[in-house]
Image (cartoon, rainbow, N blue to C red):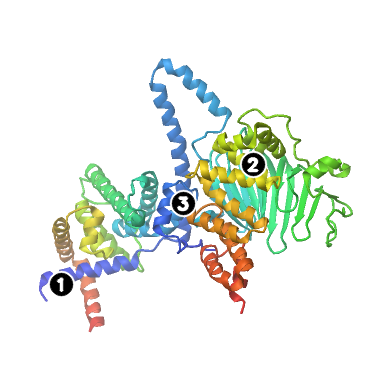
């Protein structure tokens, strides 16, 4: 049997108030409602399911300790997403430090087990995430939220607590670097040329 | 198209690939993650306590003696601040505390001090209040095996339909069938006290006994576990069925008449204490000495007791009065809770209990007002399901089935598997 999903008539404000009041059922309800969202953000930003599971754990573990700081219970979803983004950013920084310490000789990152329908897609995604690993955490996160989560620039700015102009600058820098790297990788370029032609064909 | 534009198209293409490839969280990941999180949260509570000890220790050698003394006291009595941690195997806990089983063996709710509640396959239950002393668990439908670890100050309450089972340390099976309105309590060991709408006062059930209560026929049977079940029949109140002891309608009546065979079966509420030390009504309630609490309150003066007793004692008095069907005292105690401690959870619960009192005494309109007030004050409270269900049935009785349909729809939206769901569907399906 598949666990039942969250009850639709329980509002975010009700849920947040229940958490703040220490209702025994509330942590599980909050988890059931938002764990898939947090997991999705972490999975797409980091590219590894096991990391996404750990990040989701960490987000809720910290969030429950800080839920009393939530001023507007109705904004509980934004509160959860902000927490998720903060923890993902922290993880990206941690990874970057570890890479400096352990992998500076070769500059390589370990192979990441990524999802994908076929071997070629998995290979492309692995190389793509290896490219993303070269971005600074902030640029990478802005890029992920804009392009992978389809958030608006304003939403990214609010979620990351940055000014809109900073978000625009970070995004432009990240997109230019990613597209430049793709252009410099013949295998990736061939894959995306083919994908782009296919998309144009569908659009026409 | 320029080279730059082409490269940005590549970004879109890779984003599309990522979105298409990233798998969403699976139900198994969700359940496993919740288990792990619940475990970590329990650890954090315990670690918090340890940190507090370290901080206290660092205050200085002068404080050590006092700290050690306090610690000894806390070992003797469950902590008053940290709620018990729990985990669930074979199921998950959802909104409103509802426990859902998704394994063939049922769902097992395990608490950090060793107590467990196994919800049998097909059964539905709900975890309500949980604190350092125990928890309140409602069996909405079906059977549960309860193993309560004995410890000083433990307080576990099991709702089974309209019945309340008060537990200290014991092992038993309890089941409630809403369709036939039948309660079964089979005691493996220990002692529980059962209160409900048939036997006034409490019925004590001890190890090796089985209690069966049929609400429809007002039949209360207490027999040894090995005794065969009597054949189904329509009971005549007061007539003992063959092969079983039938309890008198009230426990006080049993005491008054000295009903020999009922006493031989062993189920008795403790006799009323000649006097209770101040501040012990909660302990007396846990021990099932409801009559003792009432006599003590009257000895002290009911007005003075209502005006001066602390919140916990007032709640114990209200409970004792409800269990002994002293509606006048129960009503006054509940109103005093609301007046004196208006912001407390007990004051909110009192609104629901006042509604029940009004309903049983025929005051349907007043009952509806109290249920509405409770639902307004505690929309997610432990009694929310029951209050909405009672509101639905009371509305049908007072204003007619048509008027109750809106409440029925609300009930089904909030509690699609609740104990009033069948009644709600019946109201909505009616022409």
Q: Secondary structure at mark 2?
A: strand
Task: Please say if A138 is above or below B193.
Answer: below
Residue drawn at the location 26% of the way across and 81% of the way down? A202
Circle 1 or circle 3, nearest the eye: 3
Residue drawn at the location 24% of the way across and 54% of the way down? A160
- Comparing B235 with B116, the one in front is B235
Same chain shared by disc 2 and disc 1: yes
- Comparing B112 with B233, the one in front is B233
Q: Chain of mark 1?
A: B
Q: Chain of mark 3?
A: A
Badge 3: residue crowd in 10 Å (few <14, some 14–19, many ≥20): many
Task: Read off the residue under disc 1.
Answer: B6
Residue B139: where, in percent of width, then height?
Answer: 63, 54
Observer able to see residue B142: no
Question: In whole angstroms, how far apart are the C-alphas of marks 1 and 3?
Answer: 48 Å
Residue B250 falls left or right of residue B100: right
Task: Read off the residue under disc 2.
Answer: B148
Task: Please say if A192 is above or below B331.
Answer: below
Residue B86: where, in percent of width, then height?
Answer: 53, 45
Observer able to see residue B60: yes
Residue A43: where, in percent of width, then height?
Answer: 34, 58
Question: In whole angstroms, how far apart are the C-alphas of marks 2 and 3?
Answer: 24 Å
Which residue is the extreme one toward the bottom? A204
Residue B282 falls left or right of residue B263: left
Task: Read off the residue under disc 3.
Answer: A26
């Amino acid at each position: 049997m598949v666990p039942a999903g969250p009850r639709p008539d329980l509002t975010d404000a009700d849920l947040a108030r229940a958490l703040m009041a220490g209702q025994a059922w509330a942590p599980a309800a909050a988890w059931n409602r938002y764990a898939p969202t947090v997991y999705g953000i972490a999975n797409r930003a980091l590219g590894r399911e096991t990391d996404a599971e750990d990040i989701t754990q960490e987000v809720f573990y910290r969030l429950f300790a800080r839920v009393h700081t939530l001023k507007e219970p109705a904004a509980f979803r934004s509160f959860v997403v902000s927490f998720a983004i903060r923890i993902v950013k922290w993880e990206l920084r941690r990874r970057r430090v570890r890479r400096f310490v352990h992998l500076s000789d070769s500059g390589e990152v370990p192979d990441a087990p990524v999802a994908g329908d076929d071997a070629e897609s998995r290979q492309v995604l692995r190389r793509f995430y290896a490219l993303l690993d070269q971005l600074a955490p902030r640029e990478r996160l802005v890029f992920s939220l804009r392009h992978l989560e389809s958030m608006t620039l304003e939403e990214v700015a609010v979620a990351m607590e940055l000014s809109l102009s900073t978000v625009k600058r970070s995004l432009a820098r990240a997109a230019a670097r990613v597209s430049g790297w793709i252009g410099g990788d013949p295998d990736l370029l061939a894959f995306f040329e083919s994908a782009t032609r296919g998309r144009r064909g569908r659009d026409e | 198209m320029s080279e730059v534009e082409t490269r940005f198209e590549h970004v879109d293409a890779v984003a599309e690939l990522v979105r298409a490839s990233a798998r969403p969280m699976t139900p198994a990941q969700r359940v496993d993650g919740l288990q792990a999180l619940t475990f970590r949260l329990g650890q954090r509570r315990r670690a918090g306590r340890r940190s507090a000890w370290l901080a206290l220790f660092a205050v200085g050698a002068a404080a050590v003696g006092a700290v050690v003394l306090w610690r000894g006291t806390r070992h003797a009595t469950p902590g008053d601040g940290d709620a018990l941690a729990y985990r669930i195997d074979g199921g998950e806990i959802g909104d409103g505390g509802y426990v859902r089983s998704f394994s063939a063996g049922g769902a097992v709710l395990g608490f950090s001090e060793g107590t467990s509640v196994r919800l049998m396959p097909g059964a539905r239950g709900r975890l309500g209040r949980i604190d350092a002393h125990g928890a309140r668990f409602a069996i909405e439908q079906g059977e549960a095996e309860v193993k309560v670890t004995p410890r000083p100050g433990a307080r576990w309450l099991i709702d089974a339909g309209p019945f309340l089972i008060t537990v200290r340390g014991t092992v038993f099976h309890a089941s409630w069938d809403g369709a036939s309105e039948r309660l079964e309590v089979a005691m493996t060991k220990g002692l529980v006290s059962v209160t409900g709408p048939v036997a006034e006062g409490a019925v004590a059930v001890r190890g090796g006994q089985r209690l069966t209560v049929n609400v429809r026929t007002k039949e209360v049977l207490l027999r040894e576990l090995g005794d065969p079940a009597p054949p189904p029949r329509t009971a005549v109140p007061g007539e003992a069925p063959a092969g079983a002891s039938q309890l008198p309608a009230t426990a006080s009546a049993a005491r008054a008449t000295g009903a020999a065979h009922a006493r031989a079966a062993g189920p008795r509420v403790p006799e009323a204490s000649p006097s209770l030390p101040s501040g012990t009504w909660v302990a007396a309630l846990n021990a099932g000495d409801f009559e003792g609490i009432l006599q003590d309150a009257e000895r002290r003066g009911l007005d003075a007791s209502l005006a001066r007793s602390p919140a916990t004692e007032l709640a114990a008095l209200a409970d004792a009065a409800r269990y002994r069907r002293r509606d006048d005292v129960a009503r006054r105690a509940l109103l005093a809770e609301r007046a004196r401690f208006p912001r407390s959870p007990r004051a909110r619960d009192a609104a629901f209990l006042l509604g029940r009192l009004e309903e049983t005494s025929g005051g349907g309109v007043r009952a509806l007002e109290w249920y509405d007030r409770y639902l307004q004050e505690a929309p997610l409270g432990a009694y929310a399901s029951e209050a909405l269900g009672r509101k639905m049935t009371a509305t049908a009785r007072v204003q007619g089935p048509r008027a109750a349909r809106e409440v029925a729809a609300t009930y089904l939206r909030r509690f699609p598997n609740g104990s009033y769901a069948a009644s709600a569907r019946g109201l909505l399906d009616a022409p």
